Image (cartoon, grey):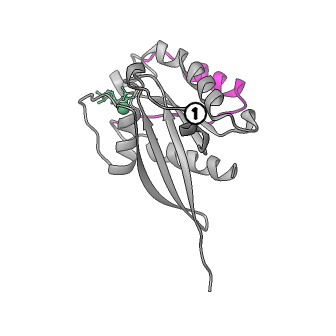
């Protein structure tokens, strides 16, 4: 008789307020999108069951607040993380510039034994807006940053149109598993 152990993976989603973190998670887990903005306060998680090869995996995806006044997470929160998903809005330069800060802050708080090997994923969200004509961050710029951090996987996504959302979260699960 074979007993399959279920693996729990903790994924933390970080990025500026309004980039679409909550929408990406809602699209991934509930297949829903809302145009209305409601700021996340503190942090909350959703779970999703996945099968990756012969492994049963429970993804515990933590949505966090981009707005500083709603942030209330201590180092203990970050420490058990298996993957960090960084999100920016391809139409807002500042949200890309601050990815560097989120990355740094995560590493400072989570303090993984090998920071260069810790699994990150970068998502450039809202590529649907104006058919991509209002984007200000090029794919190359994002890819260059990812390369400079030790080849972080990069996906361009639309939570609104459900573009690349599944593949991006699947990738976060796979890189987290590989690092276990
Ligand atoms: P905080 O909770 O404050 O950190 O923000 P957030 O990153 O969770 O942003 P949220 O998911 O709430 O989305 C902010 C706004 O952007 C909402 O009005 C969404 O409808 C919109 N939005 C999110 N993703 C997309 C997308 O892919 N395309 C478009 N067009 N709009 C999006
Ligand atoms: Mg939110």
The N terminus - image quarter:
bottom right
Picture coordinates of residue 106, whole percent (x, y): 60, 29
Magenta range: 135-159
Picture coordinates of residue 160, whole percent (x, y): 33, 36
Q: For the point 32% across and 50% down, which residue is it?
A: 30
Rendered view: 4 above or below 179: below
Q: For the point 29% across and 39% down, which residue is it?
A: 33
Q: For the point 57% across and 45% down, which residue is it?
A: 172
Left or right for 78, reference 70: right
Assess disc 1: are there few (<14), some (14-19) or many (≥20) residues with their C-alpha within 10 Å of its C-alpha: some
Q: Quadrant of ligand 1?
A: top left
Q: For the point 53% across and 49% down, which residue is it?
A: 170
Left or right for 10, reference 179: left
Residue that badge 1 annotates: 75
Picture coordinates of residue 146, whole percent (x, y): 65, 27
Picture coordinates of residue 40, whole percent (x, y): 34, 31
């Amino acid at each position: 008789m074979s007993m399959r152990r279920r693996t729990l993976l903790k994924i933390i989603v970080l990025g500026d307020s309004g980039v679409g973190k909550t929408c990406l998670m809602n699209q991934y887990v509930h297949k829903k999108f809302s145009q209305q903005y409601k700021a996340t306060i503190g942090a909350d998680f959703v779970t999703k069951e996945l099968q990756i090869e012969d492994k049963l995996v429970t993804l515990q995806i933590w949505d966090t607040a981009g707005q500083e006044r709603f942030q209330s997470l201590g180092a203990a929160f970050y420490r058990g993380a298996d993957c960090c998903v960084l999100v920016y809005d391809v139409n807002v330069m500042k949200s890309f510039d601050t990815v560097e800060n989120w990355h740094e802050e995560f590493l400072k708080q989570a303090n993984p034994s090998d920071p260069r090997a810790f699994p990150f994923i970068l998502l450039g969200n809202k590529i649907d807006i104006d058919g991509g004509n209002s984007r200000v961050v090029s794919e190359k710029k994002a890819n260059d940053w990812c390369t400079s951090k030790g080849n972080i996987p990069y996906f361009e996504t639309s939570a609104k149109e459900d573009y690349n959302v599944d593949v991006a979260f699947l990738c976060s699960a796979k890189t987290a598993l590989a690092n276990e």
